[in-house]
């Protein structure tokens, strides 16, 4: 799996954890090991510009996903997953820090960025949360991936509650 993490935000973030959880999520979703992903960490001004340009919404957001080859998880265990370019995930640590402190189970900016990375990966793979049933599926899968990664890493304490809407 080729995953690039590029921090352009000016904020120190745990780039290795972002890389690790993205790799874990893609493996768990059975995405081809030669697929490519880019994660870009930006400041609030850059995120606000992207949010306005692509969503026509004001203000910065926490995460945006820009799919390329529209890869999807294979439908059966014996299907060979397709290889390709997943696309870009853009994260904003300033928004993540605020969301982490406002969450019911308060957590760090880096924990929020890990959650948002998984959220972004799922969006790249075609998951959405516009409808209640889609939201239940996506957020359930997101929690399972984050919990599995945290358990594998031996991290203790509650997993961050989803703060993305």
Image (cartoon, grey):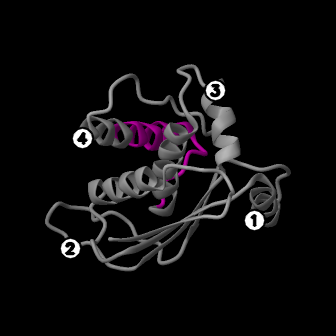
* Residue 101, label in figure: 3
Residue at 60%, 50% in the rendered image: 12
Residue 151 position, x and y percent, is: 26, 35
Residue at 48%, 30% in the rendered image: 160
Query: Looking at the rendering, in which quadrant would you find the C terminus?
Result: top right
Mark 4 burial class by Cα count in 10 Å: few <14, some 14-19, many 20+: few
Magenta-colored span: 126-144
Q: Earlier in the sequence, mark 4 or mark 3?
A: 3
Residue at 58%, 38% in the rendered image: 109
Residue 57 position, x and y percent, is: 82, 53
Residue linked to disc 1: 54
User: For this rendering, which residue is in front, 146 or 8?
Assistant: 8
Task: Tell me if 158 is positioned left or right of 5 in this view.
Answer: left
* Residue 118, label in figure: none
**Numbered label tally:** 4
Q: Marks 1 and 4, how far apart in space?
A: 36 Å
Task: Tell me if 154 is positioned left or right of 126 in this view.
Answer: left
Q: Quadrant of residue 94?
A: top right
Mark 1 burial class by Cα count in 10 Å: few <14, some 14-19, many 20+: few
Residue at the extreme top: 104
Query: Looking at the rendering, in which quadrant would you find the N terminus?
Result: bottom left
Is residue 84 depicted above or below 120 in this figure? below
Residue linked to disc 4: 152
Residue linked to disc 2: 80
Q: Marks 3 and 1, how far apart in space?
A: 27 Å
Q: Earlier in the sequence, mark 4 or mark 2?
A: 2
């Amino acid at each position: 799996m080729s995953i690039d993490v590029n921090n352009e935000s000016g904020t120190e973030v745990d780039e290795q954890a972002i890389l690790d959880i993205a790799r874990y999520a893609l493996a768990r979703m059975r995405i081809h090991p030669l697929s490519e992903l880019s994660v870009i960490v930006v400041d609030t001004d850059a995120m606000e510009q992207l949010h306005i340009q692509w969503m026509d919404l004001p203000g910065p957001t926490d995460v945006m996903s820009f799919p390329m080859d529209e890869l999807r998880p294979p439908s059966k265990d014996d299907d060979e997953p397709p290889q390709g370019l997943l696309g870009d995930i853009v994260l904003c640590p300033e928004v993540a820090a605020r969301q982490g402190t406002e969450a019911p189970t308060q957590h760090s900016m880096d924990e929020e960025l890990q959650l948002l990375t998984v959220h972004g990966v799922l969006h790249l793979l075609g998951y959405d949360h516009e409808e209640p049933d889609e939201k239940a599926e996506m957020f359930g899968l997101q929690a399972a991936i984050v919990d599995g990664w945290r358990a594998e890493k031996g991290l203790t304490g509650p997993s961050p509650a989803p703060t993305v809407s």
